[in-house]
Image (spheres, rainbow, N blue to C red):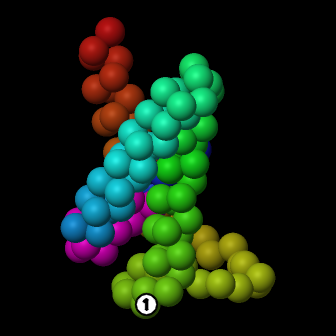
Amino acid sequence: MKNEFVVLFQYCIGMGNSKLPMKIMLAMNILNVLCSTILILLFHMGTAGIAIPALVARIGAAIIIFTLATKLKGDIHLEKTLKYRFNGGVVKKILGIGVPFGIENGMFYISRI
């Protein structure tokens, strides 16, 4: 779930809107801390009291970003449709950016070992 979450935030940043992900992350973290505190101190849930609010906050933030991505009509947007066609040109462009970035990122992490 973490990778999908990051992709949705990077989508907003790529659209030139870096304030929106910051506000959503802030709200998500505040919700996480408050709910974790309540579940641990009042309901004595232990580890589950930390895990449940973290999961709920992340899912909530992902739903908010996904909803905004389908409503906003910028250069990059998501369409609500059941008809999906394979577009080789778009896949080639995505891979042309993603593969070199992935290799660079992999080399960075290998160098940290």
Relative horizontal placement of residue 18, taking residue 31 as reference (left or right)? left
Q: Is residue 6 above or below residue 68?
A: above
Quadrant showing the C terminus: top left
Q: Which residues are magenta?
A: 8-18
Q: Is residue 24 visible?
A: yes
Q: Is residue 67 above or below residue 34?
A: below
* 83 and 56: which is toward the camera: 56
Q: Position of residue 93 (x, y in %)?
A: 45, 66
* 16 and 37: which is toward the camera: 37
Relative horizontal placement of residue 73, taking residue 1 as reference (left or right)? left
Q: Position of residue 12 (x, y in %)?
A: 34, 68
Q: Is residue 31 above or below residue 84?
A: above
Amino acid type of the residue tagged 1 in the rendering = Lys
Q: Is the magenta region chiefly helix, strand or loop? A: helix
Identified at 49% across, 37% down, the residue is 38
Query: Can you tell which quarter of the image residue 15 is in?
Result: bottom left
Q: Is residue 33 magenta?
A: no
* 34 and 67: which is toward the camera: 34
Identified at 26% across, 59% down, the residue is 22
| Residue occupied by mark 1 | 73
